[in-house]
């Protein structure tokens, strides 16, 4: 109804809030796989209503792989502490 009246920003705000509440409901209904999928979408892109989150996630992933690539190409030892435990 809000979109037909031209109030798109308000409609987006309510739709986003509905997605967040749906995620909480999934957790309470013990539908953990669907909850985790919804949580992942919420964190990565804000259900499509917060596109800057996608940009931040993209920059973070590129940064992590750039650091790993630099470590591999410069013979930096990645066998220390918790990192070794994760790999093995």
Image (spheres, rainbow, N blue to C red):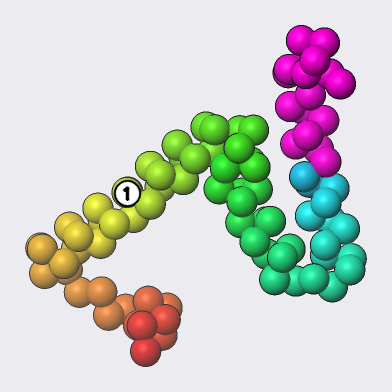
The residue shown at (38%, 52%) is 61
Figure check: 66 above or below 35 = above
Residue 78 visible in the snapshot: yes
**Quadrant location of the N terminus?**
top right
12 to the left or right of 79: right
Q: Quadrant of residue 25?
A: bottom right
Residue displayed at 68% across by 56% down: 38
Inspect the magenta stretch and tell me whether residue 15 lies in it.
yes
The residues colored magenta run: 1-18
Q: Nearer the viewer, residue 6 or 77?
A: 6
Dominant secondary structure, magenta:
helix
The residue carrying mark 1 is: 62
Residue lying farthest to the bottom in this orientation: 88
Q: Is residue 66 left or right of residue 33?
A: left
> How far across and how far down the image is residue 7, in percent?
78, 13
**With respect to residue 27, does 57 lie above or below?**
above
Q: Quadrant of residue 13?
A: top right
| Depth order, front residue of 48/78 | 48
The reply to whether the magenta stretch includes residue 83 is no
Image coords of residue 88 (percent x, y): 37, 89
SS at mark 1 in the image: helix
Q: Residues within 10 Å of mark 1 (few under 14, many from 20)?
A: few
> Is any atom of residue 10 visible in this view?
no
Residue at 67% across / 56% down in the picture? Answer: 39
Residue 86 coordinates in the image, percent (x, y): 42, 81
Residue 23: percent from the left, percent from the top?
79, 55
In depth, the one of 74 and 28 nearer the eye is 28
Q: Is residue 24 above or below residue 54?
A: below
């Amino acid at each position: 109804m809000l979109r037909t009246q031209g109030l798109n920003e308000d409609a987006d705000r309510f739709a986003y809030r509905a997605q967040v509440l749906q995620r909480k409901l999934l957790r309470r209904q013990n539908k953990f796989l669907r909850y985790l999928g919804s949580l992942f979408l919420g964190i990565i892109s804000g259900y499509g209503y917060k596109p800057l989150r996608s940009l931040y996630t993209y920059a973070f992933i590129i940064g992590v792989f750039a650091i790993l690539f630099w470590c591999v190409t410069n013979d930096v030892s990645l066998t220390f502490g918790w990192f070794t435990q994760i790999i093995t």
